[in-house]
Amino acid sequence: MDEKKIAKNIKNFRISKKISLDQLAKLSGLTKGYISKIENSDKAPPLSTLIKIANALHIDASLLLAEDSEAPQDLSLCIVKKNERKEVVSRGTLYGYHYEALAYKKIGKNMEPFIIEPEFNEKAVFSHDGEEFMYVLEGKHEFMYDGKKYILEEGDSIYFDAILPHIGRSIGEKQAKILAVMYFYKRR
């Protein structure tokens, strides 16, 4: 996906809901300057930031990632075929993670599942509301959580409170591939 489209979607939803940059900043806990920078950027912000913005706009984060920013039909069932997966954040972003959305069609979800491929030299530290579950599909993953280091290998899993600082990176010969499920407390 063209990351410029994500920035455009944020701005379009903000304007359509008649929300100023100041209001969105207060609702999301971000600064007005940062939101303006996001809306005018060629790169997508980290996923945790997209989720804060979506929550503040009272929309599903998947709408910010859609090629056409129209709301998909609200269904109780969501099937995404392998060839329909959407790349959410590409390797060219500031944060280096590669995310594939696995349930972007489902509106009103509490969980957001992804396939994540962390880079080898990851430096961004994340902290956001909710909980996360990760299952290592391939490779080795070095995971730092609240100042402690954990090495996760293929078949290992971890479940954690995402508000505490966390960071991960691939280690070894092969880039890690991880099934990650983020859980949010508020249903939209």
Image (cartoon, rainbow, N blue to C red):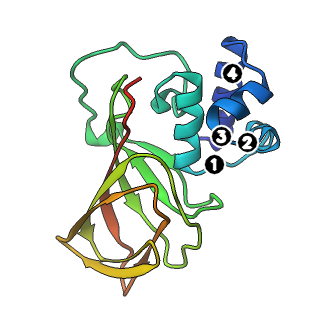
In the image, 76 versus 129, the foreground residue is 129
Side of 21 where 3 appears, left or right: left
Q: Quadrant of the C terminus?
A: top left
Q: Give amino acid for label 1.
A: Pro
Q: Given contact means CB atoms under 8 Å apart, are the residues at marks 1 and 2 in contact?
A: yes
* Crowd class of label 4 (few under 14; some 14 to 19; many from 20; radius 10 Å): some
Residue corresponding to mark 1: 45
- Dot 1 or dot 3: first in sequence order is 3
Residue 47 on image: x %, y %: 52, 48
Residue 90 on image: x %, y %: 54, 54
In the image, 116 versus 67, the foreground residue is 116
Under circle 1, the secondary element is loop
Side of 39 where 28 appears, left or right: left
Instruction: Name the residue located 58 percent from the left edge and 51 percent from the top edge.
Output: 46
Residue corresponding to mark 2: 38
Alpha carbon of mark 3 to alpha carbon of mark 2: how far? 14 Å
Q: Give amino acid for label 3.
A: Gly
Residue corresponding to mark 4: 14
- Dot 3 or dot 2: first in sequence order is 3
Alpha carbon of mark 1 to alpha carbon of mark 2: how far? 7 Å
Under circle 4, the secondary element is helix
Above or below 36: residue 134: below
- Dot 3 or dot 4: first in sequence order is 4
Residue corresponding to mark 3: 29
* Crowd class of label 2 (few under 14; some 14 to 19; many from 20; radius 10 Å): many
Instruction: Name the residue located 50 percent from the left edge and 26 percent from the top edge.
Output: 63
- Dot 4 or dot 1: first in sequence order is 4
Above or below 124: residue 100: above
Using the rendered image of the protein, determine whether residue 1 is visible from the camera's viewpoint: no
Q: Given contact means CB atoms under 8 Å apart, are the residues at marks 1 and 3 in contact?
A: no
Under circle 2, the secondary element is helix
